[in-house]
Amino acid sequence: MAAVRDTVRLGRIGGVPVGLNWSLIVIVGVFAFALAGNRFPIDAPGYHKEWYAVAGVATALALLASVLAHEFGHAYVARRAGLEVEGITLSWMGGVTRIVGDARTPRGEIAVAAVGPVISLLLGGVFVGIGFGASAAGVGNLTVVAIDWLAVINIVLAGFNLIPAAPLDGGKILHAVVWWIARDRWRATHVSSRAGLLLAGGVAALGLYEILGRGDEVNGLFVLVLGWWLLNAARDEEQLAKVQHLLGGVPVHDVMRPVAAAPGWLAREEFVERYARLYPGWVWLLERWGGGYNAVIAGDTLMAAAPTPPGTRTVELALPVEAAAGADPREEVLAALERSGGHRLLLVVEGERTVGAVLPADIETILRTRHRPGPTVAPAH
């Protein structure tokens, strides 16, 4: 799933960092306004507007606390299972618990995924009980209505999250079941993400029906956005799984391409004729006048670049060495890419020698051809 990051840090709960994304702040405001302006005056008539506003805000904040409990359940069980939890971000879709790595067993994945909906369902039951008790005790109708809404929303949240489609909790449960039966994590992810695409299509169709068939632009637009979010999240999960399937356990030296040194002060035309054209696919460490390297460039990139003025030096078209990240030839490609922090190129270093390089195009080729790479022989340069 696409990453959702904190806009506001709230602190820590049980050692887990918790934050808000700006999108949730907007949704909470819209939700509170909708309850205060539309639902509460109908369900509990006879109150002043100020009381409806207070009840709307209080209900929205209580729902926010319920979502936090849902996500903290995921975090707690994940940590008990030995997984690292980066934090919880509450967003417009409820929340995201950022868990590093994957569950080691299908049973562990089910436990982590199922605990959130279970908590939401239990909270719904608790609010149902509180609502009955408050009604029997003669508490004001507006308070009872707000509690009933919290009960309904938590139960609906649990049910929605249990739909067996990625990226929902039910999709993770489906993933675990298929993984357990087929003993193939990639097939399991393929099944759950495809179910997510079907769900996204259905939600989007419902949104269009709301707009075109019922003339409800507001709700229809919200449902359409939800369908768009589900679609992108399902695609992201499948893409991530594809990367893990093809590159999981693959060392850097199986992916890297040859690298060698060449003078960076040469004009582009001369460099292409003397180096790039003779050694296709190689990456070049560009030497500076007086010793050392100050830039790096792929020969293929240099040859494919747009025409430049005569005499343009190769170093002027290259990437500064500082913009590349380093990697050990024996470490896993996925670990090196994650640690690179978005750098456009990896230089593979063994001891004091640069023995290879990995470009984004190399990873894209693997994903496009769906072919796990084999060992690469390091050049002698």
Image: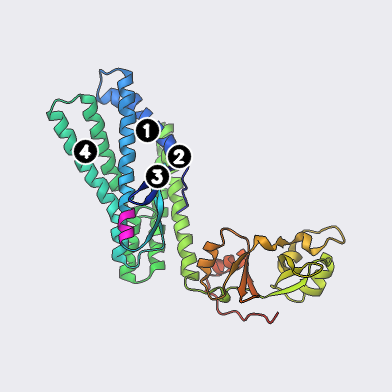
Circle 1 or circle 3, nearest the eye: 3
Query: SS of the residue at dot 2?
Result: helix
Q: What scheme was used to colour the molecule?
A: rainbow
Q: Amino acid at mark 1?
A: Phe
Judged from the image, the secondary structure of the residue bearing numbered disc 4 is helix
Q: Which mark is residue 194?
A: none
Cα separation, mark 1 vs mark 3, equals 24 Å
Q: Nearer the viewer, mark 3 or mark 4?
A: 3
Q: CA distance from mark 4 to mark 2?
A: 26 Å
Q: Amino acid at mark 3?
A: Gly
Name the residue beneath numbered marker 4.
127
Residues at circles 1 and 4 in contact by the CB criterion of under 8 Å: no
Which circle, 2 or 3, is nearer the viewer? 3
- Callout 2: 10 Å neighbours few (<14), some, many (20+)? some
Q: Amino acid at mark 2?
A: Ser
Q: Nearer the viewer, residue 36 or 182?
A: 36
Pick whichever of labels 1 and 2 is earlier in the sequence.
2
Residue hosting label 3: 11
Residue behind mark 2: 23
> SS class of the residue under badge 3?
strand
Question: Is tag 3's residue or tag 4's residue first in the polypeptide sequence?
Answer: 3
C-beta proximity under 8 Å, tags 4 and 2: no
Residue 126 locus on image (x, y percent)? 20, 41
**Real-space Cα distance between discs 1 and 2?**
12 Å
First of labels 2, 3 by sequence position:
3
Left or right of 4? Residue 70 is left
Disc 1 is placed on an element classified as helix
Q: Which residues are magenta?
A: 75-80
What's the CA distance linking mark 1 and mark 4? 19 Å
